[in-house]
Image (tube, grey):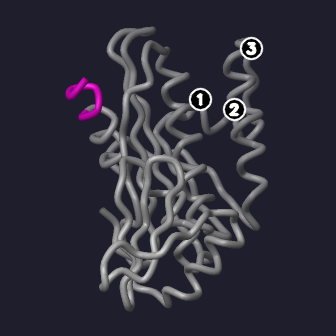
Amino acid sequence: MPTVECDVDAARSRLEDAGVAIEEGNTDHERWRAERGDATAVAYDDKVVIQGTNPAELEGLIREGGGRAHVYFDGACRGNPGPSAVGWVIVSGDGIVAEGGHTIGRATNNQAEYEALIKGVRVARDYGFDEIDVRGDSELIVKQVRGEWDTNDPDLREYRVTVRELLTAFDEWSLKHVPREINDRADELANEALDDA
């Protein structure tokens, strides 16, 4: 349950500008409430508490945004293809901003990696970061997105197009391959999601 310490009036304005409906609070302590998807934001005097299973988009709108973040991504697959999951972590100078993992059904290793990359980049975009440094341990995915390697697989080509479109939301971005041990938290989240399925 993310808690954002902020100017709640400015946060309300950002939500209204994004088309999010605002309601009055349910108690004397609540200043206002806002809902989007399956997340609810509740404002108090100097903070907003966000509840629900997918708080990232609301949290991104409430925070002032900007700045630089590192995005780590990893896909996990039991069989190829087989049951699959994604893990992602967003890190700023203040530490871990957000992280998550969830199953995606049956997929190949490469599809799971792309799904994880897409999720991580979308969350970073929703948080309003201007610049991102993306890191993953799949050399194939990194080199395909950077245009160094091509693919004959139409599904992977479509994934690559989606990632490239998402990256245009940022003023600057980089994408690098890192060893698995550098990417261990994203790997852990993807595997935990599979274990819990």
What residue sits right under mark 2 in the picture? 144
Q: Are marks 1 and 2 in contact (CB under 8 Å)?
A: yes
User: Looking at the rendering, which quadrant does residue 74 occupy?
Assistant: top left
Secondary structure of the residue carrying numbered label 2? helix
- Using the numbered discs, state the Cα–Cα distance from disc 1 to disc 3 in whole angstroms: 15 Å
Q: Are marks 3 and 2 in contact (CB under 8 Å)?
A: no
Comparing marks 1 and 3, which lies closer to the viewer? 3
> Residue 140 got which mark?
1
Q: Are marks 1 and 3 in contact (CB under 8 Å)?
A: no
Residue 196, x across and y down, in percent:
21, 28
Q: In percent of the image, x 44 and y 13: which residue is there?
A: 106
Q: Which residues are magenta?
A: 192-197
- Classified by dominant secondary structure, the portion drawn in magenta counts as helix
Q: Amino acid at mark 1?
A: Leu
Residue 46, x across and y down, in percent:
39, 90
Decide which of tag 3 and tag 2 comes sooner along the chain.
Answer: 2
Identify the residue at the far left of this view: 196
Q: Amino acid at mark 2?
A: Gln
Q: In percent of the image, x 36 and y 66: which residue is there?
A: 96
